[in-house]
Image (spheres, grey):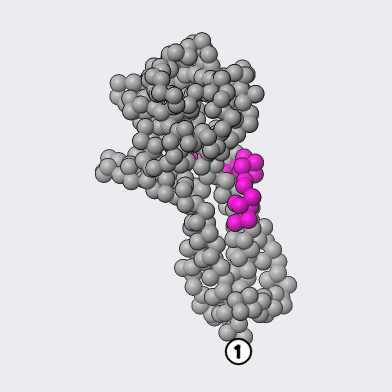
Amino acid sequence: MVLQHIKDAAQIVFSSKKYIIMAVVSFIAFFLLYIFTLPATYAGGRIGLISLRLLTPLQGIFSFFMALFISLIVPFTVYGFKRGVKGNKASKTGGFLVSILPPLLCCSPLLPTLAATLGALSPVFGFTSGVQGFIATNETYILLGATLLLGYALLQTAKSTKQCIC
Amino acid sequence: MILGFIAILVVSGCTSNTTPPSTSKPPSTSNSVVLQLGAPAPDTTFTTIDGKEKKLSDYRGEKVMFWYFATWCPSCIKAAEVLEQNNDKLNGMKVIALKTYGNAGYNGPTISEFGQKYSPNALNYDNWVWGDASQQATSTYNSQNYPDIYFLIDENGILRGVDGAPAATLNKIVNFAQG
């Protein structure tokens, strides 16, 4: 049922070659983005070639599926937009941000630096350490949530795309 | 645009150090103790995994990697695995692996549980010392409460380097150990 919506939408959208190209480019771009950013959790927030050495199989799987979902959402959304269909921006943006933030926040100086800056205003340091710990120990679930959110966004976009051909 | 964003991320990752403290400027610490590269590393105490009280100065005459970490931290878990696998490249350098006081603000396994789970062989390596950092040791070396920070100290007790995420900075550690 769910796959049928996506399959139908893909048949409609990918009848045009430019949307196929858009999907391929999106997939490559976002897959690269994910495989470089997700291992930041093991690299103290570093993003670079070191990421490829520290990438775990699970992170590779998450990278693949999240990039796949986004690479379908992008052409579906553009196709719908050109036909005046309004999409749910919140679930798309939310899924993307939720997937990217954990590896950048965990074990990097980002939160402590923010905390140190805010420290002059309020004693928040203990709180941000707790946030880092929570993110670190629940990262798999957070990434799973992000993937599901993107999957939900893809489904909604697919349904919208089907509706706009009437 | 997206490719441009990725390129910026990758390039910035290659050219700048975003891990806890930079190598050229140690983290700020308590007012009474100054950490400075090229200056003597302040002495401090910690408790080893078998309950012995030790001082950093007990290891004078040996190169030391003085590592503070939280046992919930993913980069620390990865580091424990990577350092264990590469122990033969460390040239006998002392690796003092300490659970930072308060575990950087979040619950996690004990230092013993951490070692047994992620670095079991290193628990028996002669050049490794596992333990818990005292509050004083943590306020001296890790007052910012980073979950993953290490200091490289030479045979004369001089602080030569500071960084985080050993798995990502292994070359730096190996170069120091072999240099």
Give the residue displayed 46% in from the left and 48% down from the top.
A137
Give the residue displayed 40% in from the left and 32% down from the top.
B100
Is residue A31 inside the magenta stretch?
no
User: B25 or B135: nearer the eye?
Assistant: B135
Query: Is residue B31 rendered to the left or right of residue A50?
Result: left
Percent position of residue B10, x then y: 60, 45
Secondary element type, mark 1: loop
User: A106 or A114: nearer the eye?
Assistant: A106
- Where, quadrant-wise, is the N terminus of chain B in this rendering? bottom right
On screen, residue A163 above or below A129? below
On screen, residue B92 above or below A26? above
Give the residue displayed 41% in from the left and 28% down from the top.
B132
Residue A19 quadrant: bottom right
Q: Which residues are magenta?
A: A43-62
Q: How many marks?
A: 1
Q: Which residue is mark 1?
A: A166
Judge the density around disc 1: few (<14), some (14-19), many (≥20) Cα neighbours within 10 Å: few
> What's the chain of the residue with tag 1?
A
Residue at the far front: name it. B50
Q: Amino acid at mark 1?
A: Cys
Residue A109 in sight here: no
Residue B62 in sight here: yes
On screen, residue B104 above or below A164? above
Is residue A58 inside the magenta stretch?
yes
Percent position of residue B67, x then y: 48, 28
On screen, residue A159 above or below A29? below
Give the residue displayed 53% in from the left and 65% down from the top.
A148
Percent position of residue B47, x then y: 40, 23
Residue B124 quadrant: top right
Residue A161 quadrant: bottom right
Percent position of residue B176, x then y: 58, 21
